[in-house]
Amino acid sequence: MDNKFQDKETAKQFITSKLENKYHEEFVYKKSETEYFKKYPTKRIYMGTFSPKENTSRVVEVWASNSGEIKDNYASYFYQDTIDQRTKDLLKDKHFITSSVIEFVGGKTTKNFTDSTEFEEYFQETESFYEVEIELRKNLSDEEYASEIESILHSLYEPLNHFYLKVKQDNKLIFMYEFNKEKKSLSKTEILEDLKNQKEEREYMEEVFSSMSESE
C-alpha cells in the first residue's frame, strides 16, 4: 500500500482532505502544543488539531497513520446540547464546593457518526469521558472531605457514566478517581482510605523531589 504522507506537511494535507470528505465542510490546521509526528520502522504516525474553516472555535483532535487510518473526535460537537443538559447545574446543590469545572472529552474514532446518531451509542463506541475538577474548602478533616467527596460522587455516577474526578483543596490535589460502568460506587470508608493513601504518596514524592533538589 502506498504511503499516504511522509512528513508533517503532507500529513496535514492528507488529514484535511479526509475530514472534508467525511464531514462535507472545509477544515484548516490549528497550531497545537500536542502536535507530534513519529516515524516508526514500518509506518509514520501524526497527531494534531484542526478546525472547521467556518467555525474555528471548534477544536478537532486527529490521529492518523500513513497506512490511511484516521481517527478524530469532531462528532462530539453534534451532541453539545445533550452534554450541556447533563452537566448543567449537576453540582449546584453542593454548597460546600468552592469551584467546579466539568468538561466532555470526545473519544477519537474512525466511524462516521452523524447528528442523527444517538448520544449513548456515540459515547460508548468512542470511549468518551468527562473530566471533573472540584475545589473544596480548606482546613477540613479527612473524615469531612470523605463525606463531601461521597456526596459529589453520588451526583456524578448515573448521569456521567465514565468520568475522571480531581478534587483539590487550596489548589492542591487531594483525591483522584476514575469511574466507569465496570466499577462499583465507592463507600465513604473506601474514599477515606484513598484520601489517606494518596496523601502518603504525595508526601513521599515531595520528599523525593526535595532530596533530589538538595543533592544538585
Image (cartoon, helix red, strand yellow):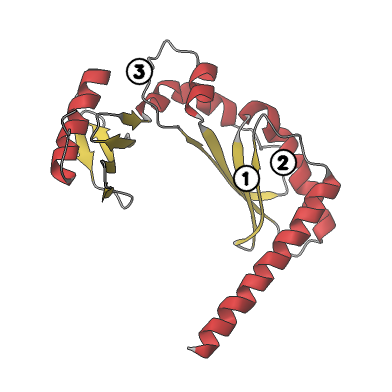
Image point (16%, 37%), residue name: 5
Mark whose residue sits in front, 1 or 3: 3
Residue 185, position as x, y percentages in the image = 76, 36
Image point (72%, 41%), residue name: 152
Mark whose residue sits in front, 2 or 1: 1
Tell me if I can see residue 124 in this picture: yes
Label whose residue precedes the other's in the sequence (2 or 1): 2
Residue 165 disc label: 1
Do the numbered discs 2 and 1 sit on residues whose CB atoms are within 8 Å? yes
In the picture provided, is 24 more to the left or to the right than 168?
left
- Rendered position, 67 above or below 42: above
Q: Residue furthest bottom?
A: 215
Q: Which residue is nearer to you in this view: 13 or 29?
A: 13
**What amino acid is labelled 3 in the image?**
Asn
Secondary structure under tag 1 reads strand
Question: Residue 86 lies in what quarter of the image?
Answer: top right
- Rendered position, 94 above or below 78: below
Quadrant for the N terminus in the image: top left
Residue 33, position as x, y percentages in the image = 31, 53
Image point (45%, 12%), residue name: 117
Do the numbered discs 3 and 2 sit on residues whose CB atoms are within 8 Å? no
Question: Residue 168 lies in what quarter of the image?
Answer: bottom right
Residue 189, position as x, y percentages in the image = 85, 49
Residue indicated by mark 2: 152
Residue 198, position as x, y percentages in the image = 70, 60
**What amino acid is labelled 1 in the image?**
Leu
In the picture provided, is 85 more to the left or to the right than 26?
right
Tell me if I can see residue 138 in this picture: no
**What amino acid is labelled 2 in the image?**
Ile
Q: Which residue is nearer to you in this view: 49 or 101?
A: 49
Residue indicated by mark 3: 112
